[in-house]
């Protein structure tokens, strides 16, 4: 069972991660904007810009997904099931939770999914 102090530490980590992700998402949204066809770039530079835009969009999508998961974790941090693996129903190691507080699977179950 997770102790109250551990929950407080995780809550601070989640809030900090959410804040950082929101800043990152704002920056990525600028980079992922479509490149105007009339933009005066050379052919190769335009292709490079489009490739960079595609990479930014993928990172943006992953960042938004993690943000949603972190917000969900924050909503459920006081739930008795917070920190319990959804597969094996064992407690998720606190060290894993400190790194990825949005984790819903223990290392063993997360590893067996790949």
Image (cartoon, rainbow, N blue to C red):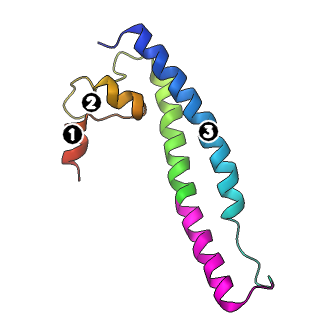
Quick one: 79 or 23, which is closer to the camera? 23
Mark-to-mark CA distance, 2 and 3: 26 Å
Check disc 1 and report the residue beneath it. Answer: 109
Secondary structure beneath label 1? helix
N-term mark: 2 or 3: 3
**In the image, what residue occupies the spot 72% across and 59% down?**
30
Pointer 2 with pointer 3, Cβ within 8 A = no
Q: Is residue 45 magenta?
A: yes
Mark-to-mark CA distance, 1 and 2: 8 Å
Coordinates of residue 38 in the picture (x, y in percent): 81, 85
Please say if 6 is above or below 113: above
Q: Residues within 10 Å of mark 2 (few under 14, many from 20)?
A: many
Q: Quadrant of residue 101?
A: top left
Coordinates of residue 94 in the picture (x, y in percent): 33, 23
Secondary structure beneath label 2? loop
Secondary structure beneath label 3? helix
Quick one: 106 or 88, which is closer to the camera? 106
Check disc 2 and report the residue beneath it. Answer: 85
Determine whether, in the image, residue 113 is placed left or right of residue 60: left
**In the image, what residue occupies the spot 22% across and 49% down?**
113
Check disc 3 and report the residue beneath it. Answer: 20
Asked whether residue 78 is in view, the answer is no
Q: Quadrant of residue 57?
A: bottom right
Q: Nearer the viewer, mark 2 or mark 3?
A: 3
Disc ID at residue 61: none
N-term mark: 1 or 3: 3
Asked whether residue 71 is in view, the answer is yes
Mark-to-mark CA distance, 1 and 3: 28 Å
Find the magenta span and give its range: 40-58
Pointer 1 with pointer 2, Cβ within 8 A = yes
Determine whether, in the image, residue 24 is placed left or right of residue 82: right
């Amino acid at each position: 069972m997770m102790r109250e102090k551990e929950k407080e530490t995780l809550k601070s980590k989640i809030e900090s991660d959410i804040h950082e992700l929101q800043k990152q998402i704002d920056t990525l949204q600028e980079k992922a904007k479509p490149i105007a066809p009339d933009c005066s770039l050379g052919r190769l530079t335009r292709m490079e810009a489009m490739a960079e835009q595609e990479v930014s969009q993928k990172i943006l999508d992953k960042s938004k997904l993690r943000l949603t998961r972190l917000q969900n974790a924050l909503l459920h941090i006081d739930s008795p099931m917070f920190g319990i693996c959804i597969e094996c129903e064992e407690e998720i190691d606190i060290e894993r939770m400190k790194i990825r507080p949005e984790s819903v699977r223990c290392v063993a179950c997360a590893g067996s999914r790949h």
